[in-house]
Amino acid sequence: MDYMLNFYIQIKNSSDLSDYLAFAADECPESVDLCYSLAVQLESQGLYDKAEMEYARCLLLNPAHHYAKMKLGLLKLKGEYNK
């Protein structure tokens, strides 16, 4: 994940980073790490619906991904609480 830090330092803009991660995740659809990184970035931007979709995609790729399970569950609870 050091390459992600290097890109973030160079990009310095969270929407550019999201665009890059979305592109990379589309190019490497089997990469759970890219999918998870995109979900985290989307969540940090307040794009909760998109983040939920990416966390769910992580779990399709790796059903044992504990952080994706946790983050998806927290987002769902947050969504129910805010209704």
Image (cartoon, rainbow, N blue to C red):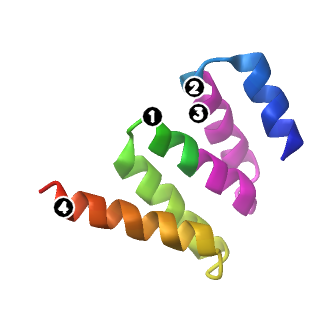
Main secondary-structure element of the magenta-colored stretch:
helix
Q: What residue is disc 3 on? A: 18
Q: What residue is disc 4 on? A: 81
Question: How far apart, in angstroms, are the residues tagged by discs 3 and 1?
Answer: 9 Å
Relative to 8, does residue 28 appear above or below in the rendering? below
Please tell me whether mark 2 sits on a helix, a strand or a loop.
helix
Which circle marks residue 14 in the picture? 2
Question: How far apart, in angstroms, are the residues tagged by discs 3 and 4?
Answer: 26 Å
The kind of residue on which mark 1 rests is Gln
Please tell me whether mark 1 sits on a helix, a strand or a loop.
loop
The region drawn magenta spans: 16-38
Are the residues at dot 1 and dot 4 in contact (C-beta closer than 8 Å)? no
Q: Nearer the viewer, mark 3 or mark 2?
A: 2
Question: How far apart, in angstroms, are the residues tagged by discs 1 and 4?
Answer: 19 Å
Are the residues at dot 3 and dot 2 in contact (C-beta closer than 8 Å)? yes
Are the residues at dot 3 and dot 1 in contact (C-beta closer than 8 Å)? yes
Question: How many dots with numbers?
Answer: 4
* Mark 4 closeness class: few <14, some 14–19, many ≥20 residues within 10 Å: few
Are the residues at dot 2 and dot 1 in contact (C-beta closer than 8 Å)? yes
Please tell me whether mark 4 sits on a helix, a strand or a loop.
helix
- Farthest residue toward the bottom? 64
Q: What residue is disc 1 on? A: 45
